[in-house]
Image (spheres, rainbow, N blue to C red):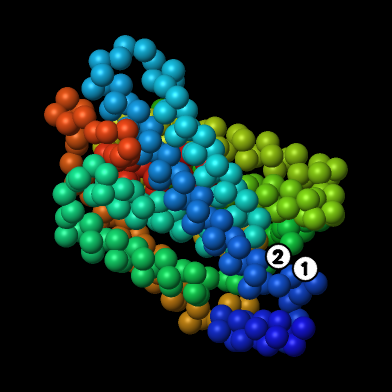
């Protein structure tokens, strides 16, 4: 027991949080270090599985093209295995929101970008560029800073807590501004027919903000229910489920439109930056994750985000377009990755 107290004391001092100061979350914290690390591990594993799954699906398409198979791609067992891994990865990301702050889980999506870069070089024999090395190094350093200086509180997400947050004045103001901005952007996109990439990706990011809030709420309440404190009987749980499904559906719609109109090397890094920024903002406004965090921690956390953003841009920019007819057939034992390196950054929520 003494060892646990000492560990929590050291952990609180390292993150700039004063454990002796009363906090609105004091009564709902439970072994913050253990829970926080569990969320990080689950998120990293989930993003790694998503990266592998995208590359498996890409390989299935390439293999079918090489064999001249005219059957639909969804008849391939290999393609469905990739879909299965994708489901496991997204499930891991979903679960991670129940253990760690949303402002940390979203930026960890850069792990999938780094993993895809490694897969491309090892299995596809793609040329290793200097920008890949620099970008990967920056992303790794940024991830380390994020994990070290992010909020380390482990809040029990209950129905009563979500209800209280949903009617807080800061969230109501934030929601009003988001609705206004979204309406203006949608008017420019639909009525004025302005198809600029920034407008489309901002629409995705605003929806992603609601997705992150609802995903963390649903995941947290399911986690508490599994522990024995049933939360599924409260109406707010089903409200959040509806918000999660609706925001995800429209998010995917706009994201697919962006992928049709613009190159993946443009969409991927912009989406990663906008999504991460919206997720961090949602965590700060709705879940008050930066409350009590030292100024140094906040600055270093933002610096880590900046390094991750730059790293993703360097890795995703000017990706070579690989044509399947020019690719030598690769044995089944190896899984290639073409442009999926960038697409992995699209999965921090449920894309």
Of 4 and 276, nearer the camera is 4
Q: Is residue 97 above or below residue 335?
A: below
**Residue 14: x, y in percent?**
55, 84
User: Marks 2 and 1, Cα distance to the nearest angstrom?
Assistant: 6 Å
| Residue name at image x 55 percent, y 50 percent | 93
**Residue 134: x, y in percent?**
23, 64
> Can residue 213 be seen at all in this image of the molecule?
no
Residue occupying the far top of the picture:
70
Q: Specify whether 91 is left or right of 29.
A: left
| Residue name at image x 31 percent, y 48 percent | 119
Q: Is residue 64 above or below residue 182?
A: above
**Residue 279: x, y in percent?**
52, 55
Q: Which mark is residue 155?
A: 2
Q: Secondary structure at mark 2?
A: loop
Crowd around label 1: few <14 · some 14–19 · many ≥20 (10 Å): few
On the image, numbered disc 1 is attached to which residue? Answer: 28
Q: Is residue 255 above or below residue 107?
A: above
Q: Quadrant of residue 140?
A: bottom left
**Residue 211: x, y in percent?**
58, 45
- First in sequence, mark 2 or 1: give its number: 1
| Residue name at image x 46 percent, y 58 percent | 107
| Residue name at image x 61 percent, y 86 percent | 10
* Mark 2 vs 1: CB contact within 8 A: yes
Of 272 and 13, nearer the camera is 13
């Amino acid at each position: 027991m003494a060892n646990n107290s000492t560990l929590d004391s050291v952990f609180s001092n390292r993150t700039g949080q004063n454990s002796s100061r009363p906090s609105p979350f004091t009564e709902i914290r439970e072994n913050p270090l253990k829970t926080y690390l569990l969320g990080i591990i689950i998120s990293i594993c989930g993003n790694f599985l998503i990266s592998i799954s995208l590359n498996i699906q890409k390989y299935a398409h390439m293999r079918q093209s090489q064999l001249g198979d005219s059957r639909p791609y969804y008849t391939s067992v290999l393609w469905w295995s990739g879909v299965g891994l994708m489901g496991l990865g997204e499930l891991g990301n979903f679960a991670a929101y129940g253990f760690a702050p949303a402002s940390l889980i979203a930026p960890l999506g850069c792990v999938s970008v780094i993993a895809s870069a490694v897969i491309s070089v090892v299995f596809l024999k793609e040329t290793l560029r200097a920008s890949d090395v620099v970008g990967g190094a920056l992303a790794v350093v940024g991830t380390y800073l994020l994990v070290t200086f992010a909020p380390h509180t482990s809040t029990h997400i209950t129905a009563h807590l979500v209800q209280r947050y949903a009617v807080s004045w800061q969230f109501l103001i934030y929601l009003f501004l988001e609705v206004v901005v979204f309406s203006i952007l949608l008017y420019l996109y639909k009525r004025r027919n302005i198809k600029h990439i920034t407008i489309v990706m901002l629409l995705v990011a605003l929806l992603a903000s609601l997705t992150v809030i609802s995903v963390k709420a649903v995941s947290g309440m399911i986690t508490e229910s599994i522990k024995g404190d049933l939360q599924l009987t409260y109406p707010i749980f089903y409200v959040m489920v509806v918000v999660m499904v609706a925001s995800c559906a429209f998010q995917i719609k706009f994201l697919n439109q962006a992928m049709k109109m613009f190159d993946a090397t443009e969409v991927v890094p912009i989406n990663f930056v906008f999504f991460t920024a919206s997720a961090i903002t949602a965590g700060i406004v709705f879940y008050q994750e930066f409350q009590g965090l030292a100024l140094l921690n906040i600055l270093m956390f933002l610096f880590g985000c900046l390094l991750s953003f730059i790293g993703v841009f360097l890795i995703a920019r000017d990706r070579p377009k690989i044509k399947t007819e020019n690719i030598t057939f690769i044995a089944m034992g190896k899984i290639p990755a073409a442009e999926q390196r960038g697409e992995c950054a699209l999965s921090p929520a449920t894309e």
